[in-house]
Image (cartoon, grey):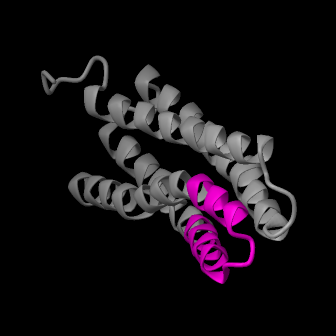
Amino acid sequence: MTTLFLALHVLAAIVAVGPVTVAASMFPPALRRAHAAPDDPDPRAVLRTLHRICRVYAVLGLAVPVFGFATASSLGVLGSAWLIASVVLTAAAAAVLALAILPAQQGALAAVGGPGGGAADRRLAMLAGVFNVLWATVTVLMIVRPGSTTGA
């Protein structure tokens, strides 16, 4: 069962978290293009699509910790420091996405066509960077796993 849980955990991370990290990173440059050409409907369509990808895949991403906890439980490592750190970082990444990135994207969509974003655009780019660094750190922890018996 451990192998199944681990496979589902890794697949969920690739399929769900990957698109969110890419779409969140693509949103700020697309937003700058939308501000540069406010009468062009194309950038707005791109922004709506990127925001939708972030929203939908954020929900699908809930499978990652579910299968992660199932895997950790079956391996008996729920109390390991590297796992606890990963859980905290995952929660932080989820909070950044749900409480900062998604609302900022929604606000940016509503403001397209108005005055240029400037600071708001840069803040959204910074938030996407923080989100991506958090996930990259979790990925490294999952691979390195301090105290692992795999020798990695």
What residue lies at 62% left-to-right and 61% top-to-bottom?
A: 33
Evaluate whether residue 91 shows in this view.
no
Query: Camera-side residue: 80 or 127?
Result: 127
Instruction: Give yes or no for residue 23 being in the magenta stretch.
Output: no
What residue lies at 36% left-to-right and 37% top-to-bottom?
A: 139
Residue 135: x percent and y percent? 47, 40
Residue 130: x percent and y percent? 58, 35
13 sits to left or right of 56: left
Q: Quadrant of the C terminus?
A: top left
142 sits to left or right of 122: left
Query: Camera-side residue: 70 or 64?
Result: 64
Please say if 90 is above or below 11: above
What span is colored magenta in the figure?
A: 28-54
Please say if 75 is above or below 59: above
What residue lies at 35% left-to-right and 48% top-to-bottom?
A: 71
The kind of secondary structure the magenta stretch mainly shows is helix
Q: Quadrant of the N terminus?
A: bottom left
Give the quadrant of residue 38: bottom right
